[in-house]
Amino acid sequence: MGLAQTLNQLEIQTEGKGFTRLNERIESWLRSTGIDQGVLHLTCLHTSCSITINENADPRVLDDLAAWMEALVPQDGKGPKDSNGERHRYRHDDEGDDDMPAHIRTALTSQTMTLSVLNGRLLLGTWQAVYLWEHRTIGNARRIACHLIGNKQAKASSTFQSQEANNQTKLSLRNADRLNQQIQDRIKPDGWAEEGGIETDVDLLIDRLHEISDS
């Protein structure tokens, strides 16, 4: 097992304002690197789009995010109200009404993120996905720089470590059973009543240990 690093750029074609899921493209590249475990740093190489982690199951979440951003930074070419309640055009409007608003939306979101990689995959929560968030009204060719640093593992080593992980899991289960039995042996069924009906710190600790051992 040795430390390695690699740098790549993903090219993403967007269709205009909205979200493009990146998980599958990133993980396809991760598999090609041979790096099993490490850290992945992503950088969006633009000033009018961004990257974000959010809900991957219910598309209404992304719809609500887009609506919120539309209300916060309208793309009509005008800035916020001044002290007189008037809105004036942005000075930077070379590429249309959505030009400066796209830059503001980018400033309010994220251009970079760092993620853990485990077993050649992104380490994300069950409901998480990585998205490119396009802030321009027309489609664009976008680039995401991917810098991966981690360990390359031989197949034999991976198999050995997998077996070690299984052994550790079995040992943890045996320890949990043993812990649960020790709790059962020491617990006083009438202890709660002896304390005047009030749960003591010991009672609460035993309850927590029960939860841990049962899980």
Image: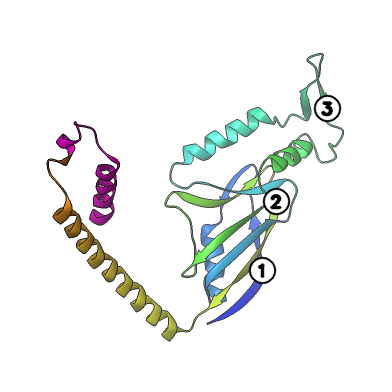
Cα separation, mark 2 vs mark 3, equals: 24 Å
Instruction: Name the residue at 42% across, 80% down.
Output: 158
Which of the two labelled residues, at mark 3 and mark 1, occupies the earlier sequence position? 1
Mark 1: few/some/many CA within 10 Å (<14, 14-19, 20+): few
Position in image of residue 9 (x %, y %): 67, 65
What colour scheme has been applied to the protein in the rendered image? Answer: rainbow
Q: Amino acid at mark 1?
A: Asn
Instruction: Provide the secondary structure element on which disc 2 rests.
Output: loop
Which structural element holds mark 3?
Answer: strand
Region in magenta: 192-215
Report if the CB atoms under discs 3 and 1 are less than 8 Å apart: no
**Which residue is painted at 65% across and 46% down in the image?**
134
Does 104 sit left or right of 161 as displayed?
right
Question: Does the image show residue 136?
Answer: no
Q: Residue at x 68, y 50 (%)?
A: 111
Camera-near label (2 vs 3) is 3
Q: Which residue is mark 1?
A: 8
Q: Does residue 91 appear left or right of residue 117 in this picture? A: right
Q: Nearer the viewer, residue 193 or 104?
A: 193
Mark 3 or mark 1: which is in front? 1
Hey, what amino acid is under mark 3?
Arg
Image quarter of residue 99 = top right
Disc 2 residue type? Asn
Q: Is residue 210 magenta?
A: yes
Name the disc covering residue 140, or none. 2
Q: Is residue 5 above or below residue 71?
A: below
Question: Looking at the image, is mark 1 or mark 2 earlier in the sequence?
Answer: 1
